[in-house]
Amino acid sequence: MTPVVRAYEPRDFEPLVALEAQLFGSDAWSPEVCALELHHPFSHYLVLDDGAVVRGYGGLRVPAGAGPGDIQTLAVHPDYRRAGWARRILNELVGHATKRGVPELLLEVRADNPAAQALYDSAGFHEIARRPHYYQPDGVDAMVMRLTLSQGEGVAR
Ligand SMILES: CC(C)(COP(=O)(O)OP(=O)(O)OC[C@H]1O[C@@H](n2cnc3c(N)ncnc32)[C@H](O)[C@@H]1OP(=O)(O)O)[C@@H](O)C(=O)NCCC(=O)NCCS
């Protein structure tokens, strides 16, 4: 089956947690953190579904008030990379935030992750700050990136 991007459903929890551990290693969220994150009332999560199992996912927090939204995570299984799936998930998350009237989106990305930085850069995000030694135990800096949204705006490629 051709993979599809669709909304997260509770049945996706266990495969998503397994993929999180596989893809993020020492930075991986625990199952408890995944549960809090995925079931948070302000969360909006999408999965890449190949018809059998979850092959990628991405999530967003949209605030109740007028503040910025946060891209919480984005990941694609190695077998499915460089096919545009992460960009597709990111586009859908940005579209959701735009429809909800979110003025800007923030995210954090490891300073030693050029693939993710290139993805976010190509989607119009810009670095606005650094958080030194944010990722532990590796001690790697976080780059804070921002995308300003306006109503009806799509994602720059
Ligand atoms: C980063 C990640 C999500 C990209 O997923 P993907 O589905 O392969 O990305 P896409 O195919 O949508 O690529 C979109 C753009 O991102 C950039 N990009 C993606 N992978 C890249 C790589 N390995 N090197 C350089 N640029 C890359 C390119 O600009 C690419 O556009 P192009 O293919 O037209 O050149 C994936 O590599 C991943 O899951 N990595 C591990 C988890 C992670 O680091 N997540 C980010 C946390 S902030």
Image (tube, rainbow, N blue to C red):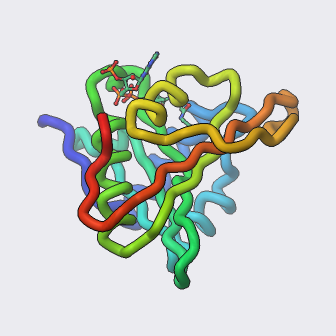
* Image side of residue 50 versus residue 70, left or right: left
Residue placed at 53% from the left, 64% from the top? 69
- The extreme left residue here reads 1
- The extreme bottom residue here reads 65
Residue placed at 39% from the left, 65% from the top? 97
Q: Quadrant of the C terminus?
A: top left
Is 130 above or below relative to 40?
A: above
Count of all numbered marks drawn on residues in the image: 0
Is 82 above or below relative to 139?
A: above
- Residue 37 locus on image (x, y percent): 59, 64
* Image side of residue 41 versus residue 2, left or right: right
Residue placed at 26% from the left, 55% from the top? 6
Is 70 above or below relative to 129?
A: below
* Image side of residue 38 versus residue 82, left or right: right
- Residue 20 locus on image (x, y percent): 56, 41
* Image side of residue 106 versus residue 9, left or right: right
- Residue 8 locus on image (x, y percent): 36, 61
> Quick one: 132 or 127, which is closer to the camera?
127
- Residue 124 locus on image (x, y percent): 42, 40
Residue placed at 59% from the left, 49% from the top? 107
Ligand 1, by image quadrant, is top left
Q: Quadrant of the N terminus?
A: top left
